[in-house]
Each structure stands twice: as structure tokens, then as C-alpha cells.
Image (spheres, rainbow, N blue to C red):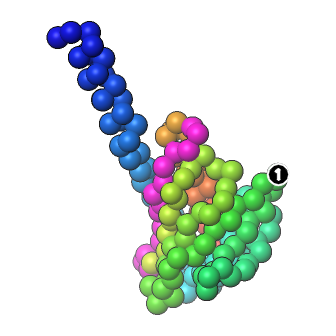
Amino acid sequence: MSILNRRTLALAALAFTAAAPAHAIDLERSATIAAPPAKVWQTIGDFCGIGNWHPAVEKCTPSEMDGKKVRLLNLKGGGTIKEEQVSRDDKVMSYTYTILESPLPVSDYKSTLSVAPDGSGSKVTWSGTFNAKGAPDSVAKDAVQGIYDSGLKALNDKSK
């Protein structure tokens, strides 16, 4: 194979790789909380209630955009995250949201927070899918996992 053909193939492969969509990162964390589901949902079900239980959030300011709930999270230590609630089901105690603006190394972020019965307590599940942005996948995953884990720990501590 000539050098020109090899270069052409290499450039075609590079172009295909660059055009291919990034592989989404899926993450799910959960915690068992020693409180009834209705009580846990009362704490986390309010979309802007995260300001009352998540240790990284200093303040949550609710608003609306195109008929959807939006929250602006002021983070302890600086920075803000703007999120939009895209679906909600109070009957099954679950809501889904996306990040609109954030300093986090992620894009195309969509997450669901839900509560389900678990024995005499509750199981809270926080799951998300996203792509790394400006950082390796492991850095993006660690950042989101840290948010989920610290929030779930705070919920668990609050129920004691």
C-alpha cells in the first residue's frame, strides 16, 4: 500500500473517530435511609429543597423557564449550577433533571433522583448519564459520584 493510501486511510479513520458520538457515562448510587419513603420524599421531592440537605449547596433559588421548574444552585466555596426539572412523578416519588449551566466537567447531563420503600425504611437512588467535557471520563465520573455520595450521606445522617 502506498504512503498516500495509508495517509488517506489514517485521515479517514481519524475523521470517523472525531465524528463518532462520545460514549455516555452511566452512574448510579443508592443509600438505605432509616425513614419512611413519604418522609424522605418530603425532604428531597421539592426540586429546590436540595439547598436544605445537600452539603455542597449553600442556596437554591427556584424559577421557571418555558413552563418548567429551574433551580440555580449557589455552591459553598463559589460557583453555580443551573438545572431544569424535565419530569416529575410524585406518586412514584421521582424526578428527572438536566444541567443547563455548570462548572462541572460534564455535558449532556441527565439525572433522576427517586425514593422507594425498602423494608421499614427507604432506598434513595440517584442515577445519571453524561459525557465528560474537558476532562477524562474518570475525572467527570469522580466529580458526579462525589456529588451523589455526599448528598446521600447527608440524607442518611439527617434521618438519624
Q: Nearer the viewer, residue 145 or 4?
A: 4
For residue 9, side relative to residue 84 (left or right): left
Asked whether residue 131 appears in the rendered view, the answer is yes
What amino acid is found at the position of numbered circle 1 in the picture? Gly
Q: Which residue is mark 1?
A: 77
Q: Main secondary structure of the magenta part?
A: strand
Q: Position of residue 77 (x, y in %)?
A: 82, 51
For residue 141, side relative to residue 76 (left or right): left
Quadrant of res 43: bottom right
Quadrant of res 2: top left
For residue 1, side relative to residue 134 (left or right): left
Q: Position of residue 95 (x, y in %)?
A: 52, 77
Q: Residue at x 41, y 50 (%)?
A: 24
State which region is magenta: 117-135
Quadrant of res 102: bottom right
Q: Is residue 91 above or below residue 147?
A: below
Q: Is 43 a magenta residue?
A: no
